Image (cartoon, rainbow, N blue to C red):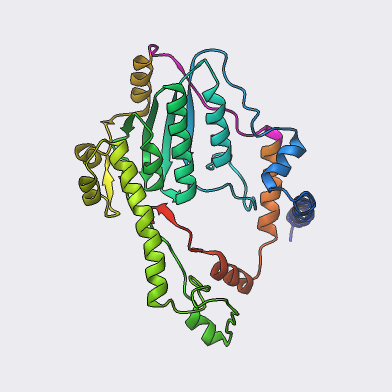
Amino acid sequence: MKGKQLAGIIAACLILAVTGMIGIGAAVYKNKMVEKSGKKTEEVLDGFLGRSRKDIKLPAEEYIGQIDVVGTIQKEDQSIDGISSGEEYRHDFYLDYIDSMIGSEQNKGIFLYVDSPGGTVYESDELYLKLMEYKEKTGRPVYAYFASQACSGAYYISMAADKIYANRNSWTGSIGVIISLMNYEDLMKKVGVSEIDITSGKNKTIGSGAHEMTKEQKEILQSLVDESYEQFTGIVAEGRNMDIKTVRKLADGRIYSAAQARKLGLLDEVMGLEEAKAEIGTALGSSKIRFFVPEKDTQLQFYFNQILGAAGKLGRQSDIQAARDLMENDESGVLMYYAK
């Protein structure tokens, strides 16, 4: 083996070892900060970096506030497991942003840039209600633009919009509700493991993957799905000024193309993003009005997230541990407005 090759291998091994030590150290330090403070991970990071969640600097000139509903709509991931690109959906941040715009005289409206398969029922409804509060308090318009997808919970949120635009290749709809669960009872029998539950009632273990679900338990969960479905279709009927019976016919969970959705009255116009922005600007009195996207993270926080994400990847669990976590946490039975 040549000397240069040997030196390269040694250098690579040293870099890997040092990176691993730094990553593991960062992960341990992060966990200790969170445990000691009793706060959420993101709150700890904000305090460490000296940034307030509500400290959003708004433009001095007239602007339209842009909210990027991108990715799965849910509460922020507190584990920071993976390198953050800064593009993930930021629920609490957007709620704070809307509150800031309510009191901003220079704000002329809100623009939702939507590229999402949907998400949890709770967060979808919370953002929708915050947008409706904004409209009620300010009298200003909300617009939505559908990029590659605006399904289920993402469509739900868009019902706050006064006008909906869509890219011609966009998929939307998927109006419906889902609870996904995993049953691993047979797997546990093969491995020779059983779960023992001491409960106060026969339905306390509802949704447990270790037991086959009873008919009564399925009916209980179905009632929750049905209730959320009624809420969803009601929101669509109100937002699109449609008869509820018409909405229910369309709301069987299927996905529609932009052209199909426009024909059915689920959105208003099919056009490109810049064309839509120009039309919105003209409607508000200025074709060159600024679409403002607030800075969500400081550069320092971005690099700190990268270190913690790398630590999470280096500290991966064994196959058995990963399988156990999958059974315990995946498809955890949360009500979702989501396109599978």
Residue 218 place in picture, x, y as percent: 39, 71
**Does the segment drawn in magenta span residue 98?**
no
In this view, 40 is above or below 327? above
User: Where is residue 193 drawn, in percent x and y?
Assistant: 59, 85
Residue 71 visible at all:
no
Which of the 4 image quarters holds residue 141?
Answer: top left
Pinpoint residue 318: horizontal percent, then vertical percent.
65, 70
Residue that appears at 33% across and 20% down: 279
Horizontal side, residue 153 vs residue 261: left or right? right
| Left or right of 282, for residue 34 | right
Residue at the location (32% across, 36% down)?
239
Magenta region, residue range: 285-300
Quarter of the image for the C terminus: give it.
bottom left
Q: Quadrant of residue 322?
A: bottom right
In which quarter of the view is residue 112 placed? top left
Quadrant that contains the N terminus: bottom right
- Relative height, residue 7 to residue 61 (above, below): below
Residue for point 69% across, 40% down: 303
Q: Is residue 207 above or below residue 260?
A: below
Q: Is residue 299 magenta?
A: yes
Q: Is residue 122 visible?
A: yes
Tell which of 81 and 137 is nearer to you: 137
